[in-house]
Amino acid sequence: MRTAFVMAALAVTVGALTACAGGDGEPVVLPGTTPAVTSALEPTTAPPGTGPVILPEATGPTIVVPGTPDLPTRADATVDARAYQQRESFYFQSPTGNIMCGILADAPFGFGCQLAKANTIPARLPGCTDAPDRKVAVHVDGNTREFLCTSQGIFVGSPVDGTNKGGGATLHYGDTLVARGVACTSTEKGVRCEASGHGFFISADEQTLY
């Protein structure tokens, strides 16, 4: 009889505590207990014998910060740069000999190419006539990108084949030379050189800086 009375008293007490939770449905934490943690993520059950399950945190969109493009490496090259080296600079010419290029260690530094003959003159060089002393050239040095009309063989290397024609060794179509952080590729359409995202394309019919 005494046991029945105690159980009835406990039932009344629990009912009173539940009523004190109010109409908002919030749970009541009894002294000496630990509140339960709920998650909006799908419930995950840990296999027997494992530790606690750690739910992944929600993440926001990935923010990509533009940086400086990587410089080319020897892995990008198809030729040995030493075959084109003259002192501390590197020179080459296209298979036709019309495009002559240099990756320079001396002033004006940077890298560039010039044409023996240009079919198209850039609009930025109105005084360039393709005369022997007015040759079309392009030049890049860091953030400086420019068209040149030159009377000098700025980007022309010394002869390497026993003749008097300068220009350096031939960079054949499809080959890429990498030197001093600059990559130059020879194609049937022209020569493209670049470093750190800046460079140029040059041919007798087209000259572009970027």
Image (tube, rainbow, N blue to C red):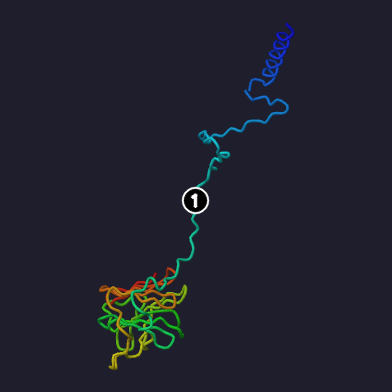
Q: Nearer the viewer, residue 126 or 191?
A: 191
Q: Left or right: 90 with respect to 162?
A: right
List x then y, in percent, for residue 44: 52, 35
Taking the spot 52% from the left edge, 34% from the top edge, the residue there is 45
Q: Choose top left, top right, bottom left or bottom right for residue 197.
A: bottom left
Residue lying at 55% horizontally and 39% vertically, measured from the top left: 50
Amino acid type at circle 1 is Thr
Among the 4 quarters of the image, the one containing residue 20 = top right
Residue under label 1:
62
Q: Measured from the top left, where is residue 75 in percent x and y?
A: 39, 71
Q: Position of residue 194 (x, y in %)?
A: 39, 72
Dividing the picture into quarters, in which one does residue 206 lie?
bottom left
Relative to residue 48, is residue 204 depicted above or below? below
Above or below, 97 against 12 in this view is: below
Residue that extends furthest to the front in the rendered view of this protein: 49
Classed neighbour count for the residue bearing mark 1: other residues with Cα under 10 Å, few (<14), some (14–19), many (≥20): few
Which quarter of the rendering shows the C terminus?
bottom left
Q: Residue at x 45, y 84 (%)?
A: 105
Query: At x 34% / y 79%, what residue is drawn?
Result: 126
Residue in front for this viewpoint, 144 or 190: 190
The total number of labels drawn is: 1
Taking 174 as reference, is 46 above or below it?
above
Residue 170: x percent and y percent? 29, 82
Q: In this orientation, which residue lies closer to the viewer: 181 or 156?
A: 181
Label 1: state its secondary structure.
loop
Which is more toward the observer, 93 or 199? 93
Quadrant of the drawing holding the N terminus: top right
